[in-house]
Image (cartoon, grey):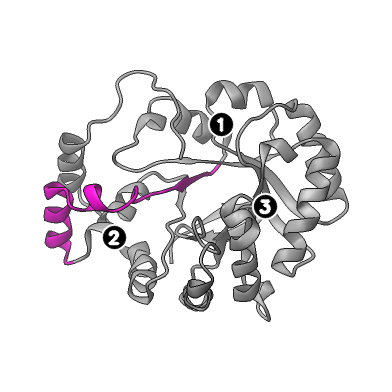
Amino acid sequence: MTTLKLADATVPRIGQGTWRMGEDPSREKQEVAALRQGIDLGLTLLDTAEMYGEGGAELIVGQAIAGQRDKVVLVSKVYPHNASRSGVAAACERSLRRMGTEHIDLYLLHWRGQYPLAETVEAFEKLQAEGKIGRWGVSNFDVDDLQELDDTRCATNQVLYNPEERGIEFDLLPWCERAGMPVMAYCPIAQGGHLLNHPTLRQIAQRHQITPAQACLAWVLRQPGVIAIPKAVNPEHVRLNAQALEVRLTEQDLREMDQAYPAPTRKQRLNMV
């Protein structure tokens, strides 16, 4: 299994996202089962946030990791409006309670807000000293944000990245690579649909006898410092995500993807969803 060092842990380069989980009680059992299946298949990096389902996703994660907390690397995120000294501490406590754990391996600022970065970092460092989090990082930060942060203790930057959203390749990815900072790619297969039906992606998938989603994940992972965190609830999709760790695209595949989705030639605004 392809792995990467993240927040002092060795993690699979495909994790499990939880956006939109915990919003519909009728899907609770299916969502918990999907995460548990993923863990069994080696997808032991779980990404969530207090924003997802307003805590609902963290409740799902808590059920999924019950009895096997030591098997997973847990990532959660704090709302910007909770990113003050006192707000971070309170938000973290709520997240810990919802997930039924005493420790979050990696705690991220979800995006920049009203509070100074120094204040948020101070709060993160206090949580780390108390043993409530292992490391801290950021999400949706562009190069100028990271330069302003200017802190080597930042363990990761989680950003939108897929063939339709390649803007980070121009400057953000190279900056993170030089800094030795892993990038977590959310929405690595976009929202499915249009991207996965693109003729080029389908042709590449057919060539390798894989699905378009697997081809897309392999394309994201061609970048050496990137981790993909797709969300899956369907058991077959979970299985295919795990298998995508072994897919390797050829130079021909990559050339065809570049023709279908050209690489950026100038600075682009960092998009987020």
Secondary structure under the numbered disc 3 in the rendered image: strand
Q: Distance between the residues labelled 3 and 2?
A: 26 Å
The furthest residue to the bottom: 67
Residue at 67%, 36% (x, y): give it.
80
Foreground residue, 164 or 233?
233
Q: Where is residue 76 in the image (x, y as percent from the top left)?
A: 64, 53
**Mark 3 highlights which residue?**
106
Judge the density around disc 3: few (<14), some (14-19), many (≥20) Cα neighbours within 10 Å.
many
Secondary structure under the numbered disc 1 in the rendered image: loop
Q: Earlier in the sequence, mark 3 or mark 2?
A: 3
Q: Can residue 179 be seen in this view?
A: yes
Left or right: 35 in relation to 127: left
Give the extent of the magenta segment. 182-209
**Mark 1 highlights which residue?**
141
Contact? badges 2 and 1 (CB < 8 Å) = no
**Above or below 95: residue 255:** above
**Mark 2 highlights which residue?**
214
Residue at 47%, 76% (x, y): give it.
30
Please state which amino acid type lies under the numbered disc 1: Phe
Q: Can residue 31 be seen in this view?
A: no
Contact? badges 3 and 2 (CB < 8 Å) = no
Residue at 80%, 30% (x, y): give it.
119
Judge the density around disc 1: few (<14), some (14-19), many (≥20) Cα neighbours within 10 Å.
many
Foreground residue, 15 or 98?
98
Please state which amino acid type lies under the numbered disc 3: Leu
Q: Distance between the residues labelled 1 and 3?
A: 16 Å
